[in-house]
Image: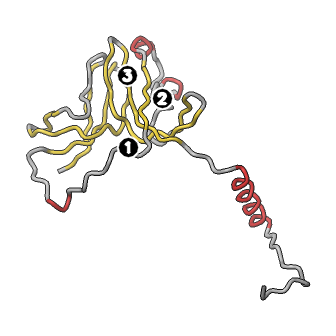
């Protein structure tokens, strides 16, 4: 019913997007999500890994979930991958030559002075020779400084084996 597939596209050709119907071994499949995106410089191509649902397979009722509101505190951000930079890359194994290295699901990105965690890719599109990659992010909410300090002190005490004993004059039955 569901599958993970890869699509390979020549550079500067628009990949399939979420909601598109494509054919996998002759059967129609709906693109539900984008799992990964790679830019391969030799030969110049884009590889996209999708989550798809085969449309010719009936969905059992046990697989249907109630519909929930989509607002889970997520926001959408995007990154532009310049097409001319894709063609001049020479080392596909170098971290600096991977344009989406910092925009992988699970990574933290800063935007307008705040930190966000990337949840998933939501779109890939072509704008002239540039790729526009969009992803949903959720804000990272730090704990209060006094809580952080308390946790840090507890961790240090545990590491050195320090145990705080009650004062002998204190009554344990209070």
Q: How is the image coloured?
A: secondary structure
In this image, 27 relative to 3: left or right? left
**Whole-Å distance between the Cαs marked 2 and 3?**
23 Å
Residues packed near mark 1 inside 10 Å, few (<14), some (14 to 19) or many (20 plus) = few
Q: Which residue is mark 2?
A: 93
At a point 26% along the width and 21% down the height, the residue shown is 14
Front tag of 3 and 1? 1
The residue lying at 55 percent from left, 43 percent from top is: 140
Spatial CA distance of label 3 from label 1 is 23 Å
Mark 3, secondary structure of its residue = strand
- Which comes sooner in the sequence, label 2 or label 3? 2
* Residue 132 numbered tag: 3
3 or 1: tag closer to the N-terminus:
1
- Element carrying mark 1: loop
| Residue 166 position (above or below residue 53) | below
Which quadrant of the rendered structure holds the C terminus? bottom right
Label 2 or label 1, whichever comes before in sequence order? 1
Residue 108 location in percent, x, y? 53, 38
Asked whether disc 2 touches disc 3, contact meaning CB atoms under 8 Å apart, the reply is: no
Q: Which residue is mark 1?
A: 71
Question: Residue at the location (67% across, 50% down)?
Answer: 144
Task: Please tell me whether mark 2 or mark 3 is closer to you in this view.
Answer: 3
- Residue closer to the observer: 71 or 35: 71
């Amino acid at each position: 019913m569901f599958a993970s597939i890869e699509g390979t596209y020549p550079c500067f050709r628009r990949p399939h997007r979420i909601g598109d119907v494509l054919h996998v071994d002759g059967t129609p499949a709906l693109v539900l999500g984008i799992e990964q995106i790679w830019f391969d410089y030799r030969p110049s191509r884009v590889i996209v890994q999708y989550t798809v649902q085969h449309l010719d397979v009936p969905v059992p009722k046990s697989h249907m979930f109630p519909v929930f509101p989509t607002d889970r505190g997520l926001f959408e951000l995007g990154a532009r991958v310049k097409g001319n930079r894709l063609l001049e890359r020479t080392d596909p194994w170098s971290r600096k030559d991977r344009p989406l290295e910092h925009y992988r699901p699970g990574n933290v990105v800063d935007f307008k002075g705040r930190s966000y965690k990337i949840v998933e890719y939501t779109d890939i599109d072509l704008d002239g020779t540039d790729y526009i990659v969009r992803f949903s992010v959720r804000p990272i909410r730090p704990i209060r400084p006094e809580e952080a300090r308390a946790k840090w002190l507890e961790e240090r005490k545990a590491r050195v084996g320090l145990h705080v004993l009650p004062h002998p004059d204190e009554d344990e039955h209070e």
